[in-house]
Image: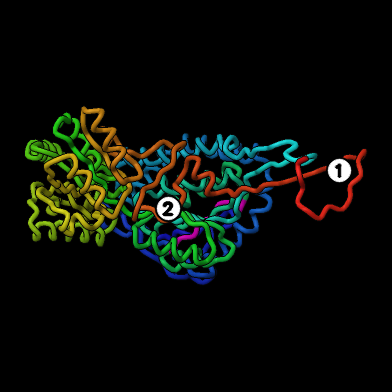
Amino acid sequence: MTTTIPHWVHGEAYLPAEPARTGEVYDPATGAVTARVALAGAAETAAAVAAAKAAFPAWRDTSLTRRTQVVFAFRELLNARKAELAEIITAEHGKVLDDALGEVTRGQEVVEFACGIAHLLKGGMTGNASTGVDVYSVREPLGPVAVISPFNFPAMVPMWFFPLAIAAGNTVVLKPSEKDPSAANWLAALWAEAGLPPGVFNVVHGDRAAVAALLEDPDVKAVSFVGSTPIARYVYEHGTAHGKRVQALGGAKNHMVVLPDADLDQAADAAVSAGFGSAGERCMAISALVAVGGVADELVAKVAERAAGLRTGDGRRGCDMGPLVTGAHRDRVADLVAAGEREGAKVVLDGRGAAAPGAVDGEPGGFWLGPTLLDHVTPEMTVYREEVFGPVLSVLRTGSFEEAVALVNANPYGNGTAVFTNDGGAARRYRTEVEVGMVGVNVPIPVPMAYYSFGGWKNSLFGDTHAHGTEGVHFFTRPKVVTSRWPDPGRRGGLRLGFPQND
């Protein structure tokens, strides 16, 4: 008998009296079903939103000092027990333990940033703006907000949003991916241990039904989403149609451009790390390696040599790369590799025959696909046009810097990009001309620190506000301007029907 992972509502585990739909949760390294997760419908989602709504007035009115104390207590607990959370992530997602621990650490940076939110919540004031009139501004929380997060970072992506939302005085309903749901419940229990009042942080598990319910609930004031571009567009359009503030981060096709003067050993190391880390299941993974000039053959050889030595296996047993999250996703990635081969790409390294080293007697084996390297990929090929989200690195060749920039800018995505060069002028020109939201110079995965904001351009972002940083604080608050005048007991008033004049 497998356990059923419950929702978390009003500070405790919650399952409806009559079991609703459930989904299977797998161990990607063995293919075995390890649990079932409750899938919320309208009633369960409404219960979570109602808890957030009921908790909001008291949490909004809690002093900023007390709110940040609770966030700091959460930070301390997370720091002490992050290895425990990393094990949960590896068991349900499949990424290796070191990678899972890195995910938690990067998410914790936003928690630490939220501990200092007081500076960013300060308003401004002008005394005696008009005779006897003072004008000042404040930033206030929105109310209940929803966070809808993907499977690839079950801890880090939610932590891009909820620490700032909570520190600013909002209440939260988190809808994690149903593929790896346990991290969300673990985080909810940690918030309770840190002293967060019941109802301020809630978790509702589910699929499209839960997402639609959150987007349509009038008590949800804002929605933060990370996922594929088609769903991001749906969340943005459906959420804004129901009067919500929405930030929806979509898919990516991240290019790493290697110029002829680059250190090719450094570039090859970076391409392998950024292309195959976390089995390529990262929105910031490098999936398109653009070789400029005559460096392609040597660069491909160096990448192939390094990638061939990667150890693929159970993330808990010491390896470089784990399995993909589900069998269906593994099959989709393999189909894209096959499409690339049919359309003329050269398969330099083929991971479709990867063994199943994590299989256990009596279990079907994991969802394996090893590092895969395709050369002579062109922009018309399916493997380039679609977001692969797997350990597949496609090499495209261009004759010049200008052609490389044009290739990147023609792509409908604009999440992240990198340029490898020893020429400062070329790097500066690339940074200026490329139409992408996050740029790395000799840095393959340019994810900014928490005090800067994360987000792309074009079809990689729907909405005007990026995640975390100052923009994240502004997303979860709204400004209010107050104009006040206190009567002077020594002066008399009188009727004035016109606009005031500053004589």
Q: Residue at x 29, y 43 (%)?
A: 434
* Alpha carbon distance from label 1 to label 2: 58 Å
Q: Quadrant of the N terminus?
A: bottom left
Q: Residue furthest front?
A: 503
| 307 to the left or right of 106 | left
Number of residues whose C-alpha sits closer than 10 Å to that of mark 2, classed few (under 14), some (14–19) or many (20 or more): many
| Residue behind mark 1 | 487
Q: Residue at x 61, y 47 (%)?
A: 479
Residue 157 sits above or below residue 132 on the image: below
| Residue behind mark 2 | 182
- Seen from the viewer's position, the closer of residues 376 and 427 is 427
The part of the image, by quadrant, that contains residue 404 is top left
- Dominant secondary structure, magenta: loop
Q: Position of residue 295 (x, y in %)?
A: 10, 36
Q: Position of residue 99 (x, y in %)?
A: 32, 40
Between disc 1 and disc 2, the foreground one is: 1
Q: Quadrant of the C terminus?
A: top right
Q: Residue at x 80, y 39 (%)?
A: 132
Reading the chain from its start, which is encountered first: label 1 or label 2? 2
> Label 2 near label 1: C-beta < 8 Å?
no
Q: Which residues are magenta?
A: 198-206
